[in-house]
Image (cartoon, helix red, strand yellow):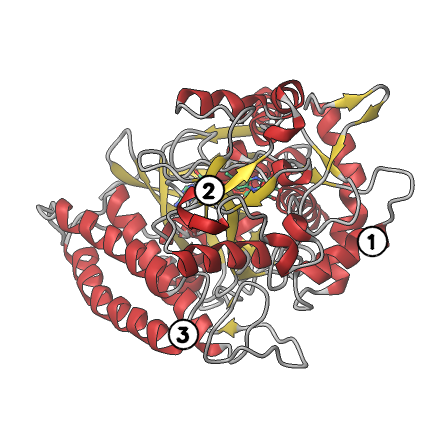
Amino acid sequence: MADTTHVSDVLIIGSGAAGLTAALNLAEHHKVTVLAKGKLNEGSTAWAQGGIAAVLEPGDTFESHIEDTMIAGAGLNNRETVEMVVENAPVAIERLAKLGVPFNTDGNTLHLTREGGHSHRRIVHVDDATGWAVQEALLRAAHAHPNITLVPDQVVIDLATSRHEERYSGAGTVWGVYAYDKEAGHVRLFTARATVLATGGAGRTYLFSTAPRGATGDGIAMAWRAGCRISNMEMMQFHPTCLYNLEVKNFLITEAVRGEGGHLLLPPDAGDEAGYRFMPDVDARAELAPRDIVARAIDHEIKRLGLDYVHLDISHKGPEFVKHHFPTIHARLLDLGIDMTREPIPVVPAQHYTCGGVVVDRHGRTDLPNLYAAGEVTQSGLHGANRLASNSLLECFVFGEAAANHITANWGDFAPPPAIRPWDESRVADSDEEVVIKQNWTEIRRFMWNYVGIVRTTKRLERAAHRIKMLGDEIADYYGHFRVTPDLIELRNLHQAADLIVKSALHRHESRGLHYTLDYPETLDVAVDTVLVP
Ligand code: FAD
Ligand code: SIN
C-alpha cells in the first residue's frame, strides 16, 4: 500500500487552457495543485492552430457570433450558455494579451482571420500556432504563482469519493483522486476540498485523430464511473483537413487555410474530374461551410471515386502570402516534401474534437458535490451538435474562470476532506500481457473509425457495441487482477469512452450536426440532448 497523500485546497486535473485558467483564478485565494498525466504541455491546447473566436471588429456583433454558433450546432446548443461564452470572449482575449500571448496585429488592432461557419473575421491568432503561445503564457504565469503546485506525470485513475472514505458518509462527495505516479511507480492519493476536471477530449478513440496521444477520454470515463451524467457523446467532430501522409497521421491543416482562400479540389486520381472544386455544389458557403458539412462532402468524394484523399490548394495566393500566414504548416510540410506555396496539400477528414462530455451548469458544476469540470471534457451547452471553429479554447477560458469564481464565492461550503482509504494493490500481480493491452487499444480505435465514423448506420453501430461488450469483459479482468500501468488506465478509459459514444449514437434516432445516420436521415423538429445516466 502506498501512503503518499498530497493535500491542497483545490485540485485540478489537467494543465491545458481550462485547467490553468481555473488555477490562475483560484490561486489568488487558495492553494492549488495541478496534475498532468505527462509533461505539462502535452494536451490539445498546445496543438491548437487557428486561434480563438471573439467579436472585436467594428461591424461584427455578439448576436452574429451567437447565431453562427447556434447554426453550426444545429440548434442543440443552450442559448444562455452560448451568450455567456460569446459575451465574455473579448475580456478573455484581453487577459491573455496581458499574460503575454503575442497575438498578431494589424497596426494598432488585432489581426483577425476567418474560419468555417463564421460570418465575420473574428479569429484572434498567433500565426498558425496559437495554442503553443497560449500554453506557454499560461504555464509561465502558473509556474510564477506561489500558490500553484504543478505536478506532471501523474496518471489519474479514478476520483476519490464518499465510497473511499474510511467512515462512509454516502453523500457522493468528491474528495480528490487516485493517480499513478509514473516516476515513483506507485499510486498516490491527492485530496482537496474541491476538484476540477480539465482532462480534455476522447479523440484517440478513433484511428485517425488530430488530437494528441493522451486524449483518451479519462475525465469523461472517471466522472461516469463516479456517478456523473454524460451527454451528446455521439457528437464527435471530424476536422475536414488533416494531412494525408502514411507516416504522419495526425497533422492538422488549419481551417484558416480555407478561411484565407484555400480551395478543395479533386486530385489527379479522380480522372476526368481532376482539379474540380466540389464544395460550391454542396453548400453556398463552399469551403467555409461548417465542419460537419465539409467533412461529409470530402468523405463522399473519397468514397464515390475510390480516392485516398482530396486536395487543399492555396498556392494561387502566392508564396509571400502563404509563408506569412502559415509559417509553421509551411515549414512542416516542406520537411515532408510538400511545398504548399506551389502545390496542393493532400488532406482527409480526421477526428478532431469531442463535443459531448460531462454535464455541467454555467458555473462548471457537475452532478457530484465538490466536483467541477471545464473545457473539452464537458458538455456545457456551448457546442450543441457541432462545434463552431475556434470556440473551444474560448470555452476553456470562460468556464475555467466561471468554475474558479464559483468555488471561491462558495468556499465556506467546502469542508476539509475526511480520511480516505489509500490505494490497495495487495491483491494484484504484475501484468505479463502488455502486448494484449496494446492490441485492444488498436482494435477499439480501428472499429470506431470503421463503424462509428462520419456516416453511420444502426447495423454498424450495433457491430461496434458488440465488440465493445466483448472487450469490456477482458479489460475488466485485467484491471481486477493486475497492477495498474498508464497503458491499462488509458485502455480502460478509452473503452469506456467508446461505449458512451456508441450508446449515445444508438440513442439518437435522427441525423443532426455531427451525427449522420443512413437509417434516420431526417432532422427532428425538436432538438434534444442525449443524456446517459449512470
Ligand atoms: P487539454 O489542453 O487537452 O489538456 C488536457 C490535460 O488533462 C492535459 O494536461 C493532460 O495531461 C491532462 N489529463 C488528461 N487525462 C489525465 C489523467 N488521467 N490524469 C492526469 N491528467 C490528465 N480549438 C480552438 O478553439 N482553436 C483552435 O485553433 C484549435 N485548434 C486545434 C488543433 C488541434 C490539432 C487540436 C487537436 C485541437 C484544436 N482545438 C482548437 C481544440 C482545442 O485545442 C482543445 O479543445 C482545447 O485545447 C482543450 O483544452 P483543455 O484544457 O480542455 O484540455
Ligand atoms: C483549426 O485551426 O482549423 C482548428 C480550429 C478549431 O479546431 O477550432
Q: Earlier in the sequence, mark 1 or mark 3?
A: 1
State how far apart marks 2 and 3 are (Cα). Answer: 25 Å
Using the rendered image of the protein, determine whether residue 205 is visible from the camera's viewpoint: yes
Instruction: Say few, some or many: other residues with alpha carbon within 10 Å of mark 1 (under 14 / 14 to 19 / 20 or more).
Output: some
Q: Residue at x 31, y 69 (%)?
A: 464
Looking at the rendered structure, which numbered label has been put on residue 347?
Answer: 2
Within 10 Å of disc 3 (Cα), the crowding (few <14, some 14-19, many 20+) is some
Tag 1: residue type?
Ser
Residue hosting label 3? 457
* Residue 127, x across and y down, in percent: 64, 25
Mark 1 residue's CB less than 8 Å from ligand 2: no
Q: Position of residue 518 (x, y in %)?
A: 46, 75
Residue furthest out toward the left? 432
Q: Which one is earlier in the sequence, the residue at label 2 or at label 3? A: 2
Direction from residue 65 to residue 403 in the image, left or right: left
Do callouts 1 and 2 mark residues in contact (Cβ within 8 Å)? no
Which residue was labeled with disc 1?
64
Image vertical order of residue 72 relative to residue 288, above or below: below
